[in-house]
């Protein structure tokens, strides 16, 4: 994953954004630690001490920064005009598949990241990071729900993406065929779930309201 070119006198945020995309590649050998930061910084010609300052906080800070860079690259590769030509299912599938495509060269680094995120002390942060990525995907797909639907969609997609990753990092099939088949099945589950929710909402809308019935008994029309 390419890093954005740095200005002559970069800020810590700009250094973080430049170094983050290269972290997983080096974490595959060095682990998710300062050595990976130093290696990524050296590769980019960035001062290693400044890079470590920009990314201080431990393994989860580095993992979160790398995942944020995947989010950003996904949005760059799938702009709104490209997604607009697709149906909703195709959009979600394309977004997840694009994330996997971005991460494909760095699967060993991602495998190590998954192991760290699964540690009990990191599970809350991992859930937050997964939620953020799911939210980014739904928003790019055009979802602007603000009701309970907002939360169920993101929780479901976060679970789908997480389970797909566990297949992806161990997939040795040609062109990740096993992962793609697994993803297609999981997306089908999501779409069926969303369809069932929509049907349930319709049924509720047409059900007689007990409160309205009691109100009419108490205040009959004149």
Image (tube, rainbow, N blue to C red):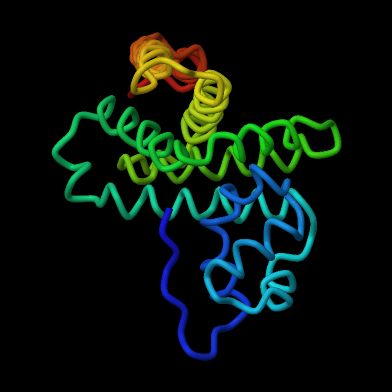
Image position of 32 with respect to 8: above or below: above
Residue 56, percent from left and from top:
76, 65
Residue 64, percent from left and from top:
64, 51
Note whether residue 205 is visible: no
Note whether residue 143 is visible: yes
Which corner quadrant holds the C terminus?
A: top left
Which is nearer the eye, 182 or 213? 182
In the picture, measured across the screen, residue 54 lies left or right of residue 220, that is right
At 39% across and 53% down in the image, what residue appears?
73
Which is nearer the eye, 112 or 143? 112
Which is nearer the eye, 37 or 98? 37
Image position of 24 with respect to 162: above or below: below
- Quadrant of the rendered image containing residue 206: top left
At 73% across and 76% down in the image, what residue appears?
49
At 37% across and 12% down in the image, what residue appears?
181
Residue 117, percent from left and from top:
72, 36
- Quadrant of the rendered image containing residue 95: top left
At 41% across and 13% down in the image, what residue appears?
178
Image position of 55 with respect to 147: above or below: below
């Amino acid at each position: 994953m390419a890093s954005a070119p740095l200005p002559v006198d970069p800020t810590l945020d700009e250094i973080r954004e430049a170094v983050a995309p290269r972290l997983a590649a080096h974490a595959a050998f060095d682990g998710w630690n300062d050595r990976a930061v130093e290696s990524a910084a050296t590769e980019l010609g960035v001062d290693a001490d400044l890079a470590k300052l920009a990314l201080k906080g431990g393994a989860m800070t580095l993992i979160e920064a790398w995942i944020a860079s995947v989010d950003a690259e996904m949005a760059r590769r799938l702009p709104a005009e490209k997604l607009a030509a697709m149906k909703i299912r195709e959009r979600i599938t394309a977004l997840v598949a694009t994330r996997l495509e971005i991460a494909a060269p760095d699967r060993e680094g991602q495998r190590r990241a998954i192991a760290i995120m699964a540690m009990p002390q990191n599970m809350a942060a991992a859930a937050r990071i997964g939620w953020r990525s799911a939210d980014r995907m739904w928003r790019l797909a055009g979802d602007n729900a603000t009701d309970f639907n907002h939360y169920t969609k993101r929780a479901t997609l976060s679970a789908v993406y997480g389970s797909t990753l566990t297949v992806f990092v161990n997939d040795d099939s040609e062109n990740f065929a096993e992962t793609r088949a697994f993803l297609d099945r999981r997306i089908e589950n999501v779409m069926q779930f969303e369809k069932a929710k929509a049907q349930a909402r319709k049924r509720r809308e047409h059900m007689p309201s007990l409160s309205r019935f009691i109100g009419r008994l108490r205040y009959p029309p004149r």
